[in-house]
Amino acid sequence: MRSWSSAVLLAAVVAFPAPAAAGDPPGGNAPLAVAEPPAGSAPPAAATTADPPGGDAQAASAPAVAPAPAVAAVPAVAPAPAVAPAPAVAAAPAAQAAAGGTGLASAVAAQQPGGDTHHRHERPALVAIRPVNPGIAAGPSVMIARYDFDGRRSGTIDDESGHGHTLRTVTAHGGSVRQVVHGKGSAIAFPPECGARMCPHVALRSPSSADLNPGTRDIAFGADVLLPPGQTSKGENIVQKGYSMTSSQWKLQVDGVAGRPSCVLVDDRRPRIRIAYSSVSIADGRWHSLQCRRAGTTLAIFVDGVTRGSIAVPSTLSVTNRRPLSIGAKGAFADNDQFNGALDNVWVQIG
């Protein structure tokens, strides 16, 4: 009887090997190689020596059983390759000093070569736009028209947005536009300020199109503008659709001899003129980026990416008309609010 008990005790000792060291996986497998966490992440919490892998509570002792056959070791997992950091974005060049001359030609010449601070062929940075009316889903923003004036054909200027709003020149009294150098491309220069009774008039126009009417939706529009100090007047139109006195309207303009830009909206049902004025002038012979933005119940004007003025507008304000898109003036007729500087990268976005 004693020899049988000794045999059983010996068998039990053989069946239950000594407990594994803390951290070893069960069954004698080789430990898995753990991939290093990405830089900056917090390290995982260390497992306690009393808990088995997975954090489960320790199981109660079981009767002695024959040992299971050895399991082949799991091959170590290679650590994940390190991710290369994204390349640094080059900083925008500093704004250039003001040009010494007062004429458009000297201002353009002073900006070249490489004088402008705007990147060519880049769409302006736009802020998020919220729905105008609650309960009406806002569609995606769409670049409806865009003109960089680099690929001008004889007599026409193509719409780079792909929507086909081709510009054509309308003139009176010998008015004309000419291409001038702007950065690595071209801009369009309009006639200089004129105090005579009959002055050259010119505008770039595209026929009316329903997709240029925002209705009550959000709208943004803008241009790169160069206006010398001596070329201001009582009013100069940059880009517009519609007329304030005879239809609804959206418009970007430069007001008065101070040369401060402003944004205009006129409702097609309540023809009150609403204007957001800039607090700063742009008539300094340097290139400036101008943006008008109607977002919900706010109309704001941005100069070089900075908000320089804003007003509240009704959420029901609607702009819908059958007037042409006009750039540089509202037409070639008398009192056409002729622009007297240079324009580039004119754009319209709706939604």
Image (spheres, rainbow, N blue to C red):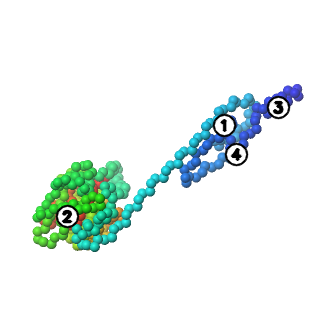
Residue displayed at 66% across by 39% down: 30
* Residue 100 percent location from the top left of the image: 28, 73
Q: For the residues carrying marks 3 and 2, which lies nearer the camera in this image? A: 2
Residue 9's label in the rendered image is 3
* Residue 326 percent location from the top left of the image: 20, 58
3 or 1: tag closer to the N-terminus: 3
Quadrant in which the N terminus appears = top right
Amino acid type shown at disc 1: Asn
Amino acid type shown at disc 3: Leu
4 or 1: tag closer to the N-terminus: 1
Residue displayed at 13% across by 68% down: 199
Circles 3 and 1, Cβ within 8 Å, touching? The answer is: no
Q: How many labels does the image show?
A: 4
Question: What's the CA distance linking mark 1 and mark 2?
Answer: 82 Å
Asked whether, in this view, residue 217 is left or right of residue 196, the answer is right
Q: Name the residue under label 4.
A: 49
Amino acid type shown at disc 4: Thr
Q: For the residues carrying marks 4 and 2, which lies nearer the camera in this image? A: 2
